[in-house]
């Protein structure tokens, strides 16, 4: 379906990425379609996996998770057992809000949200007790200059 997204689909997606609570009536008016045609397009994009969910975005500071860390991991072990253990650990740690396998010098980068440095230390101890790594380091985010969930269309 991604090859067949037309201008109207992209407009609909941009509206939903800005505010997923926008009514179908308002979306249809903004893209100059009937309500039913707009609703069908949204349902088709959901069925095709273009739209994967609708969420509420939470202010991390007001939710008690104001410290964001980028955790860089190198490992000497790349076998299936280690990978399974690592993925299981990540899934059980809500502090990990993003996890990425990398090319280049790093093997993995984690995006972690915690309340403060002591909470990060507890996270660090918990993670390193579950998996073996050859090197782990973190950089703390001083300022969110841009943070978006929107895909550029």
Image (cartoon, rainbow, N blue to C red):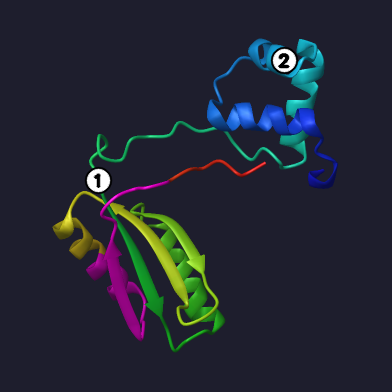
Q: Is residue 39 left or right of residue 95?
A: right
* 52 or 30, nearer to the observer: 30
In the image, taking residue 56 as reference, residue 16 lies left or right, namely right
Which quadrant does the C terminus fall into? top right
Using the rendered view, name the quadrant where residue 92 is placed.
bottom left
For the point 35% across and 86% down, the residue is: 134
Percent coordinates x, y for residue 139 in the rendering: 29, 66
Percent x, y of residue 31: 73, 19
Residue 120 percent across, percent down from the top left: 22, 60
Q: Quadrant of the N terminus?
A: top right
User: x, y (%) of residue 24?
Assistant: 67, 15
- Left or right of residue 46, residue 85 in this image: left
Residue in view at x 68 percent, y 16 percent: 30
Identity of the residue furthest to the left in this view? 118
The image's mark for residue 28 is: 2
Q: Residues within 10 Å of mark 1 (few under 14, many from 20)?
A: some
Q: Quick check: 147 above or below 102?
A: above
Q: Which residues are magenta?
A: 124-146
Residue 98 to residue 13: above or below: below
Residue, x 25% and y 34% (percent of image)?
62
**Residue at 82% in and 17% down:** 37
Q: Residue furthest bottom?
A: 76
State the residue position of label 1. 66
Tell which circle, 2 or 1, labels the residue nearer the N-terminal end. 2
Q: Is residue 134 inside the magenta stretch?
A: yes
Q: SS at mark 2?
A: helix
Residue positioned most to the front:
145
In the image, residue 138 lies in the stretch drawn in magenta: yes
Q: CA distance from mark 2 to mark 1?
A: 37 Å
């Amino acid at each position: 379906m991604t090859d067949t997204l037309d201008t109207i689909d992209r407009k609909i997606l941009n509206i939903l990425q800005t505010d997923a609570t926008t009514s179908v009536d308002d979306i249809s008016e903004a893209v100059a379609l009937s309500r039913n045609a707009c609703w069908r397009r949204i349902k088709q994009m959901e069925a095709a996996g273009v739209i994967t969910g609708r969420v509420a975005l939470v202010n991390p500071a007001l939710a008690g998770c104001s410290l964001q860390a980028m955790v860089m991991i190198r490992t000497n072990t790349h076998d299936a057992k280690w990978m399974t253990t690592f993925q299981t650990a990540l899934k059980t740690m809500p502090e990990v809000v993003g996890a990425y396998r990398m090319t280049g010098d790093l093997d993995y980068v984690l995006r972690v949200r915690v309340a403060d440095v002591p909470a990060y230390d507890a996270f660090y101890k918990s993670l390193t007790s579950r998996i073996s790594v050859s090197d782990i380091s973190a950089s703390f985010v001083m300022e969110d200059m841009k943070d978006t969930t929107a895909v550029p269309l």
